[in-house]
Image (cartoon, rainbow, N blue to C red):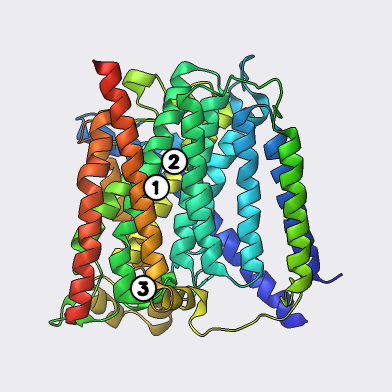
């Protein structure tokens, strides 16, 4: 009986740890985005609140808390209240299966990857419900675009990981990470990004579309739809949508690192050097988390970088790109991975 | 009552209740949104029966894609503001007959079958999990029906494209 309580306690601590990790990532990302966008556009970004403006996200959070929470008269109240929750919860749920380290994972279920796909496919409802319940033209158009975009790009997201599954032979994320251990020619890591380069590119494009990030932020496209699906939301309800986007960014980066960049495995070349000088318990417990954070940090910065570099696609361009370019490429990638697997090249 | 039966009755009650709510809503958006918890709880029931692959696929396909498509169609046709006055039209007698036939069939099948039921022992523990077992069976014993199903879907896609094209040509001319 004691073992059960101990098990539950450890599980609870893991959950708290993972949720804290996800939620603490949000202010960090807000700061990185504002500062990054500033420097990309030859501005300074936030400067005054704290050193280098690091306290700016906290000031923003206080501002959002203190703002008046307006519920417009014409909204469909139950759905209007439910929508921010439906947007936020799926974004957070993905963290349940992400292996942050060899021992740090809430649940290593044997359908981990399918779980991620299932949860990310639920994320669309918050946005669609917000779009419809707001009773606003722009919001409805935003919701409509979300629905079409998600259906189109989820297919690509799903097909792009088939190659990884062929090589790893498992749906468990921990097993997928372990399948990427080792090196080729002494220094090239056996990460799936090398045999699955096309798969990774497709996954990344679909990930941008799934998180509604530029160049695929059509659901909120501020220049044409004002603010899209969250136009009628204020105060903390708006903040939940805002946080959901960042949490979704972090979770999709985690999934990408796990699938294509060896998860918590050390970086090539510098990894073995660093690990040889550190004490053993640091290497086995702390370093995997550090490597993982470094990798997702890079991709999160990459997402900010892309946002302020590329223009937004038009709606028809988005659909053409999805169905006429990416989908055939994804099917070709499955075919190619199958041939490589059968030929025994990996 | 053990934990298993509590969970089973929870899933069963929610499935029946949300399904009933889905068919009785006048607003089509609410009807679709009530199907969501229904389908998710059916996935829960699959998990409960040890079919985790089926549960994940259920959520990915039904709640993640088909229900979104339903909502998309409702929005496109602007049915969201359209509330039907009567949800049962002329088909009351047909619906009663169909429902009764289904109940009789289910009762007969349940009595006649030899399923262990929800509280029975798991039938077969497969090494490597349910996913590999399903994949193995699908690509060996049931390869032909599986491929045939994809062909049927392909024909349906062609049909949809042909119908949609005709309409757009008529409106443009």
Q: Is residue A162 above or below residue A222?
A: below
Q: Nearer the viewer, residue A219 or A299?
A: A219
Q: Position of residue B168 (x, y in %)?
A: 29, 24
Picture quarter with the C terminus of chain A: bottom left
Mark 2 neighbour density, 10 Å: few (under 14) some (14–19) many (20 or more): many
Q: Earlier in the sequence, mark 3 or mark 2?
A: 3
Q: Are marks 3 and 2 in contact (CB under 8 Å)?
A: no
- Report the residue marked by disc 1: A249
Q: Chain of mark 1?
A: A
Question: Is residue A106 among the parts visible in the rendering?
Answer: no
Q: Position of residue A51 (x, y in %)?
A: 37, 39
Q: Position of residue B163 (x, y in %)?
A: 34, 33
Q: Chain of mark 3?
A: A
Say which residue appears at 75% left-offset and 57% top-offset: B12
Q: Chain of mark 2?
A: A
- Report the residue marked by disc 3: A177
Query: Tag 3, which secondary structure?
Result: helix
Distance from Cα at disc 3 to Cα at disc 1: 20 Å
Query: Tag 1, which secondary structure?
Result: helix
- Report the residue marked by disc 2: A245
Distance from Cα at disc 3 to Cα at disc 2: 26 Å
Q: Are marks 1 and 2 in contact (CB under 8 Å)?
A: yes
Task: Name, please, the residue furthest toward the right.
Answer: B1
Q: Nearer the viewer, residue B113 or A15?
A: B113
Query: Tag 2, which secondary structure?
Result: helix
Say which residue appears at 51% left-offset and 37% top-offset: B70
Say which residue appears at 19% left-offset and 73% top-offset: A339
Mark 3 neighbour density, 10 Å: few (under 14) some (14–19) many (20 or more): many
Mark 1 neighbour density, 10 Å: few (under 14) some (14–19) many (20 or more): many
Q: Is residue A120 left or right of residue A287?
A: right
């Amino acid at each position: 009986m004691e073992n059960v309580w101990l098990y539950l306690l450890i599980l609870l601590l893991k959950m708290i740890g993972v949720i804290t990790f996800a939620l603490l990532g949000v202010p960090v990302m807000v700061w990185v985005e504002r500062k990054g966008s500033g420097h990309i556009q030859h501005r300074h970004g936030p400067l005054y609140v704290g050193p280098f403006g690091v306290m700016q996200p906290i000031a923003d959070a206080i501002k959002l808390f203190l703002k008046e929470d307006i519920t417009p008269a014409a909204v469909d109240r139950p759905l209007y209240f439910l929508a921010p929750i439906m947007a936020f919860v799926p974004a957070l749920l993905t963290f349940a299966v992400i292996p942050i380290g060899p021992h740090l994972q809430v649940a290593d279920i044997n359908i981990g990857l399918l779980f991620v796909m299932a949860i990310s496919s639920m994320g669309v409802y918050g946005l669609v419900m917000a779009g419809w319940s707001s009773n606003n033209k722009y919001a409805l158009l935003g919701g409509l675009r979300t629905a079409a975009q998600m259906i189109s790009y989820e297919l690509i997201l799903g097909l792009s990981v088939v190659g990884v599954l062929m090589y790893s032979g498992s749906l468990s994320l921990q097993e997928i990470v372990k399948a990427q251990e080792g090196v080729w020619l002494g220094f090239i890591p056996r990460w799936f990004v090398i045999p699955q380069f096309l798969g990774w590119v497709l996954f990344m494009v679909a990930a941008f579309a799934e998180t509604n990030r530029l160049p695929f932020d059509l659901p909120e496209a501020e220049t044409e739809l004002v603010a899209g699906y969250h136009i009628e939301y204020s105060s903390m309800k708006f903040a939940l949508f805002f946080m959901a986007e960042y949490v979704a960014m972090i979770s999709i980066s985690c999934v990408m690192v796990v699938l294509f960049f060896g998860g918590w495995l050390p970086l090539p070349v510098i990894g073995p050097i660093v690990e040889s000088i550190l004490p053993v318990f640091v290497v086995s417990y702390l370093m995997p988390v550090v490597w993982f954070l470094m990798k997702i940090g890079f991709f999160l910065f990459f997402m900010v970088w892309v946002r302020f570099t590329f223009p937004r696609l038009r709606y028809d361009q988005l659909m053409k790109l999805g169905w006429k370019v990416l989908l055939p490429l994804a099917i070709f990638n499955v075919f190619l991975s199958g041939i490589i697997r059968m030929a025994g090249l990996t | 009552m053990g934990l298993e039966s509590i969970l089973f009755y929870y899933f069963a009650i929610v499935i029946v209740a949300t399904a009933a709510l889905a068919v009785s809503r006048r607003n089509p958006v609410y009807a679709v949104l009530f199907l969501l918890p229904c389908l998710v709880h059916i996935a829960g029931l699959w998990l409960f029966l040890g079919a985790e692959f089926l549960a994940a696929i259920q959520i990915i396909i039904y709640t993640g894609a088909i229900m979104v498509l339903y909502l998309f169609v409702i929005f496109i046709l602007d049915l969201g503001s359209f509330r039907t006055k009567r949800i049962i039209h002329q088909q009351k007698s047909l619906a009663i007959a169909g429902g009764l036939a289904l109940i009789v069939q289910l009762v007969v099948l349940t009595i006649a079958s030899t399923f262990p039921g929800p509280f029975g022992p798991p039938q077969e523990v497969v090494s490597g999990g349910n996913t590999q077992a399903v994949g193995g069976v699908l690509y060996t014993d049931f390869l032909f029906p599986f491929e045939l199903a994809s062909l049927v879907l392909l024909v349906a896609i062609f049909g949809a494209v042909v119908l949609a094209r005709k309409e757009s040509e008529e409106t443009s001319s």
